Image (cartoon, helix red, strand yellow):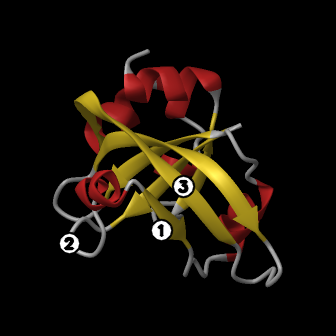
Amino acid sequence: MDYLLKTEPAVYSFANLEKEKTTIWDGVTNPVAVKNLRAMKPGERLVIYHTGDEKSAVGTATVESVEVADPKNPQVRIKAGKAIAKAKTLAEIKAEKSFADSPLVRQGRLSVVALTATQWKFLVGE
């Protein structure tokens, strides 16, 4: 499974992740988003999405480990990947038919969203 992680770039951006190389992705409170974090497995691919004024998928990362000792606050260690050559905006994502039923466009407040292989390919251009 692939996932998309939303972040406010003024708080923690993809550039921060690139600089730090790895980080713990935690502090998520939405029950569906928490469930998605708990379901992650090492090696799974991630898309980092900037919210706020940017509203675009900007980079990739990989799940390194998942700690679920506290099921309400799973801590997922992620490793920076690469910047997406041409960031995909929310408008482009909404116009893409593979996202028609995606929680990314149907549940705008959801911060951790599962992606299909087709959605991944669209977002990262692979």
In the rendered image, residue 26, in percent from the top left (x then y), is placed at: 56, 75
Q: Mark 3 is on which residue type?
A: Ile
Which numbered disc covers residue 109?
1
Whether residue 97 is situated above or below residue 65 in the rendered picture: above
Residue drawn at (39%, 53%), measured in percent from left and top?
A: 21
Secondary structure under the numbered disc 2 in the rendered image: loop
- Observer-side mark, 3 or 2, equals 3
CA–CA distance between discs 1 and 2?
17 Å
Q: Looking at this view, is 73 or 6 the one in front?
A: 73
Q: Mark 1 is on which residue type?
A: Arg
Whether residue 12 is situated above or below residue 64 in the rendered picture: below
Whether residue 83 is situated above or below residue 50 in the rendered picture: above
On screen, residue 50 versus residue 43, left or right, reads left
On screen, residue 19 versus residue 63, left or right, reads left
In the rendered image, residue 35, in percent from the top left (x then y), is placed at: 76, 66
Quarter of the image where the C terminus is located: top left
Pointers 1 and 2 in contact (C-beta within 8 Å)? no
**Crowd around label 1: few <14 · some 14–19 · many ≥20 (10 Å):** few
Q: Mark 2 is on which residue type?
A: Ala
CA–CA distance between discs 3 and 1?
21 Å
Which numbered disc covers residue 10?
2
CA–CA distance between discs 3 and 2?
19 Å
Query: Mark 3 highlights which residue?
Result: 78
- Observer-side mark, 3 or 1, equals 3
Residue drawn at (52%, 28%), measured in percent from left and top?
A: 120
Secondary structure under the numbered disc 1 in the rendered image: loop
